[in-house]
Amino acid sequence: QVQLVESGGGLVQAGGSLSLSCAASGRTFRRYAMGWFRQAPGKERECVATINWSGGRTYYADSVKGRFTISRDNAKNTAHLQMNSLKPEDTAVYYCGADYRDSDYVPRFAAQYKYWGQGTQVTVSS
């Protein structure tokens, strides 16, 4: 079992940057695919970026490609999401998810992730 805690959200002006972190418990973190998702009011939870267990394979939603960077540090049991050139439409609660995978496959749908953090609010003002 994995417990996840996000941090780093906040209020930023459009064009600014934020860095989110996800701290995970457990000794098998390196075997979990990780994903960052976001959910705006009245909308479904959507995938922002994912990363496989080794960090060698990543995926980005078209809406954030070139602006966001996902990474992980298996030695520190953490995953990160660096968000640059933020836009008002990036405003949402951001969640990190973890799913045990013994392959390089990285799920892209929220329903495929078993473990979730509590979420952190990101607000981008215009």
Image (tube, grey):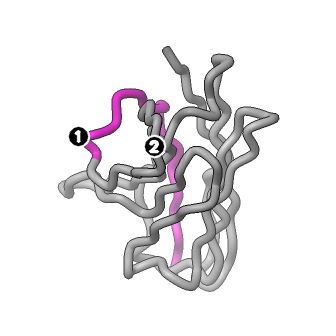
Using residue 26 as the reference point, say whether residue 57 is left or right of it.
Answer: left
Figure disc tally: 2
Instruction: Tell me what residue is drawn at x 63 percent, y 40 percent.
Output: 22
Picture coordinates of residue 72, whole percent (x, y): 69, 49
Q: Is residue 77 above or below residue 8?
A: above
Three-letter residue code for mark 2:
Ser
Instruction: Tell me what residue is drawn at x 46 percent, y 67 percent.
Output: 59
Residue 56: mark in rendering: none
Which secondary structure, mark 1? helix
Residue 73 shows in the view:
yes
Quadrant of the image occupied by residue 111: top left
Q: For label 1, count other residues whose C-alpha is less than 10 Å away and answer few (under 14), some (14-19) or many (20+).
A: few
Instruction: Tell me what residue is drawn at x 48 percent, y 39 percent.
Output: 119
Mark 2 or 1 closer to N-term? 2
Which label lies toward us, 2 or 1? 2
Three-letter residue code for mark 1:
Ala
Q: For label 2, count other residues whose C-alpha is less than 10 Å away and answer few (under 14), some (14-19) or many (20+).
A: few
Residue 20 shows in the view:
no
Q: Is residue 113 above or below residue 42?
A: above
Within the magenta stretch, is there residue 29? no
Q: Farthest residue toward the right? A: 75
Instruction: Tell me what residue is drawn at x 51 percent, y 49 percent.
Output: 121
The residue to which callout 1 is attached is 111
Which range is magenta?
A: 110-126
**94, 31: nearer the viewer:** 31
Q: CA distance from mark 2 to mark 1?
A: 18 Å
Within the magenta stretch, is there residue 122? yes
**34, 7: nearer the viewer:** 34
Using residue 103 as the reference point, say whether residue 8 is left or right of it.
Answer: right
Which secondary structure, mark 2? loop
Picture coordinates of residue 37, whole percent (x, y): 40, 53
The residue to which callout 2 is attached is 103
